[in-house]
Amino acid sequence: MTALQPARPVNRGRGVVPPELVIERADTERKFQQVLDLRRTVFHDEQHLVDMVLTDSDDDKSFILIAYIQGVPVGTGRLTPPWMSRGAYLSWIATLPQFRRQGIATAIVDQLVQEADRRRLGDLHLSAQVPAIELYARIGFSATGAEFTVRNIPHVPMTRVHRT
């Protein structure tokens, strides 16, 4: 079990990361089940974006993180390396509603970006829900396409161009 800590204090305009935040790789069945529970809570129960399909074939090849506060799972995110013609992609980024606006998602995305840079994956892509655009922009992502809607929630494609 390796705990990943933010490389620097994260405070990009949205609260200070709770000092008890621990981010770990979801590298056991127990942790992956907690990831699925978080996805269910946010993307199914709250946002109605998915119909109980909370995993896909990319999970097996992805770097998945889970964030804890005092042992309670509060957030998650996934980095999928380039595959076929698709570039590296961040997805399934979620924080429980009661823990939002505390820098947790920013800390998760920071760790995913650091891992992508460590692996030299190049540009990173994601589909941001419109309310999260500012979060991703602070981390270096820019809108790269037109707004689209998934189950009544507007999204915007964004990319972080890798700088060498």
Image: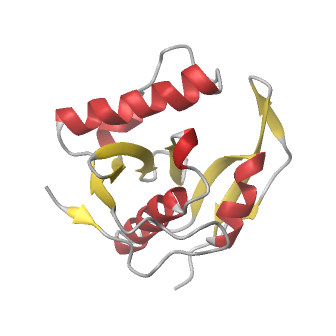
Q: Which of 31 and 13 lies nearest the eye of the viewer? A: 13
The residue at 30%/37% (across/down) is 60
Residue 25 spot, x, y in % from top left: 27, 53
The furthest residue to the top: 51
Q: Which of 26 and 34 lies nearest the eye of the viewer? A: 34
Quadrant for residue 161, please give it. Answer: bottom right
Up-down relation of residue 18 to residue 69 (above or below): below
Q: Which of 98 and 91 lies nearest the eye of the viewer? A: 98
Q: Is residue 139 visible?
A: yes
Task: Answer with left or right where residue 64 lies relative to residue 85.
Answer: left
Up-down relation of residue 101 to residue 120 (above or below): above
Task: Answer with left or right where residue 101 lies relative to residue 143.
Answer: left
The residue at 78%/58% (across/down) is 144
Q: Quadrant of the N terminus?
A: bottom left
Residue 8 spot, x, y in % from top left: 43, 82
Q: How is the image coloured?
A: secondary structure
Up-down relation of residue 115 to residue 100 (above or below): below
Residue 50 spot, x, y in % from top left: 58, 20
Task: Answer with left or right where residue 12 lies relative to residue 34.
Answer: right
Task: Answer with left or right where residue 92 lies relative to residue 57.
Answer: right
